[in-house]
Each structure stands twice: as C-alpha cells, then as structure tokens.
Image (cartoon, helix red, strand yellow):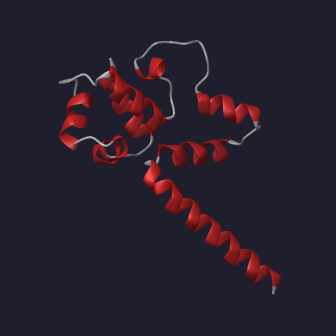
C-alpha cells in the first residue's frame, strides 16, 4: 500500500510530514491523508513523490522491479562508502529549494578551509 511506503520513506529520511508536503507543493493535510491511507495521490502526485524521494514510481507503489534502487546503483558504480551513500541519500531527500542553500554553504566552508590552510 502506498501509504505504508510513504511513511517508511519519510521516516527513513527523518523528515516531517510538513517537509514532504512542502517538497511536493501540497497542503500538509493532503499529504497526511496520503500517508494515513484516507486518500490516494493522483498520478502527477505519485510522480512528484517518486522524484522527491529519488525512487521509481514502481518502487513507491510497492512493485518489485527486480532492480536496485537508483541510489544503490549509483553507490556501487562509484564505489561509494556507506557514509558517502548516506550523505547523498540525505541530500536527495532535501526539498529542491533547500539543496542550493546547502551547496552554497558547503562551497563557502571548503573555500574557508582552503584559504586558511594556504596561509
């Protein structure tokens, strides 16, 4: 059931229901109804949810595709450590409007450290 999958994905990412609602641009009560199984999301919303979580719509709907999750494929392709995979997974779990701010913060931090070590 999609409601169970939504709750599992959200909890694994340590997000609130409000975080997800904001991330897919729906009212928080609408998202809560999806997660509690009171209402089924339409196809467009299922697609937004899959993009938000970085999974396929089949995975979100509980269909076994026999393929690894996209993040697992990426992790194995680049020989990522568990920490690197977790960092990437959490980054992708952020609402898109927060990703730019995080990247700017990281870039400034790296520049500061590089400047300090170059003195």
Is 12 displayed left or right of 28 in the figure? right
Which of the pair 91/46 is nearer the observer? 46
The part of the image, by quadrant, that contains residue 73 is: top right
The part of the image, by quadrant, that contains residue 1 is: top left
Identify the residue at horizontal 17%, vertical 24% (top origin): 38
| Position in image of residue 85 (x %, y %) | 63, 42
Identify the residue at horizontal 60%, vertical 45% (top origin): 88
Identify the residue at horizontal 30%, vertical 25% (top origin): 3
Quarter of the image with the C terminus in it = bottom right
Numbered circles on residues, count? 0
In the image, residue 34 sits, relative to residue 59, either above or below, namely: below
Which of the pair 115/47 is nearer the observer? 47
Which of the pair 62/50 is nearer the observer? 50
| Position in image of residue 45 (x %, y %) | 33, 29
Identify the residue at horizontal 39%, vertical 32% (top origin): 49
In the image, residue 66 sits, relative to residue 74, either above or below, namely: above
| Position in image of residue 112 (x %, y %) | 68, 78
| Position in image of residue 59 (x %, y %) | 47, 20
């Amino acid at each position: 059931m999609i409601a169970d999958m939504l709750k599992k994905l959200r909890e694994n990412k340590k997000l609130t229901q409000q975080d997800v609602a904001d991330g897919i641009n729906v009212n928080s009560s609408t998202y809560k109804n999806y997660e509690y199984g009171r209402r089924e999301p339409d196809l467009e919303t299922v697609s937004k949810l899959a993009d938000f979580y970085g999974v396929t719509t089949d995975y979100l709907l509980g269909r076994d595709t026999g393929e690894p999750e996209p993040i697992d494929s990426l992790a194995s392709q680049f020989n990522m450590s568990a920490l690197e995979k977790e960092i990437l997974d959490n980054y992708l779990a952020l609402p898109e409007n927060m990703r730019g701010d995080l990247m700017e913060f990281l870039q400034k931090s790296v520049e500061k450290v590089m400047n300090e070590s170059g003195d």
